[in-house]
Amino acid sequence: MKPIYEKTLTKSGMWSQVVGRGKTMRLTNVTGGANVGMLLYNADQLTERYNMPDTLKGQYVFYLTHPYCLHSDMGRIFASITADTAGWHDTVAGTTNAESILQQYGEKDYQDHGNDFHRNGRECFLIELGKWGLGVRDLLPNINWFSKVEADEEGKLHYSPESSEAGGYVDLRFEMNTLVVLNTCPHPFDPATTYPKTKVKLEVFETGTAPEVDPCRDSRPENQWALTNTEDYYKLRS
């Protein structure tokens, strides 16, 4: 299937666009070692956004992979994970800020290094959110695609660098018109001492929404209910 849109993000790239209902976004970890931080908002009603607690507790999970779904704070589904080669994506570690990047990678500002300066996830999110009239009050817990973070028996979180393999991909089938905001800054738990220079390919395909018989719909009763809520929402709006 030929994509209707393609974009490649390098190093600490930023991107935000509305992805329409019935389209699938594929993120590909081209070089390996990538982290893709993502925020989601209802494109038609920006006060509705991705809800990490509901996504996790409704599916009895700590991480994301196929066939799970991404829930909103209004009991609907933003997207279903229809394919995934990585098998584990972080939901709880958040993103980097200016202080954490400075401490880990040292100072490298725009004045001296131009576009090769060290960006951080929080500022990248805010830059993209500003394009849509959103700001600090609209920040929320983000997803980190291609990053694996596990909890041990004492509840301590551990990052697994080897999980971000070259060529890995994840497919997100959008069930709502969604404002997608993302960046490819390093994961906050990444132990590297050199700022990563990774490449992520973004493709969008026309695929349609969840059929009546679907692994994502059927993976949890909560997904069935939330997808029904989503479908009712669009029946009344169309």
Image (spheres, rainbow, N blue to C red):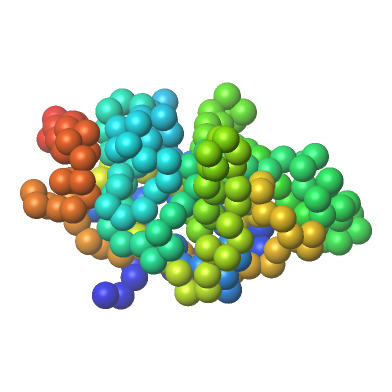
Judged left or right of residue 74, residue 149 is: right
| Residue 127 in sight | no
Please, is residue 67 above or below residue 91 in the view? below
Q: Which residue is found at the position 30% from the left and 47% from the top?
A: 68
Q: Which residue is found at the position 43% from the left and 34% from the top?
A: 52
The quadrant of the rendering that contains the C terminus is: top left
Q: Residue furthest front?
A: 153
Q: Quadrant of residue 11?
A: bottom right
Q: Quadrant of residue 156?
A: top right
Judged left or right of residue 159, residue 67 is: left
The quadrant of the rendering that contains the N terminus is: bottom left
Residue 56, how many percent across, how many down? 38, 36
Judged left or right of residue 219, residue 48 is: right
Please, is residue 148 above or below residue 228 in the view? below
Q: Residue furthest right?
A: 112
**Which sits in the foreground, 190 or 134?**
190
Q: Which residue is found at the position 20% from the left and 46% from the top?
A: 219
Residue 61, how many percent across, how many down? 37, 40
Q: Which residue is found at the position 15% from the left and 53% from the top?
A: 214
Number of dots carrying numbers: 0
| Residue 137 in sight | yes
Q: Quadrant of residue 171?
A: bottom left
Please, is residue 127 above or below residue 214 in the view? above
Q: Residue furthest left?
A: 212
Residue 94, how many percent across, how many down? 58, 39
**Which sits in the foreground, 110 or 73?**
73
Residue 87, how many percent across, how many down? 40, 59
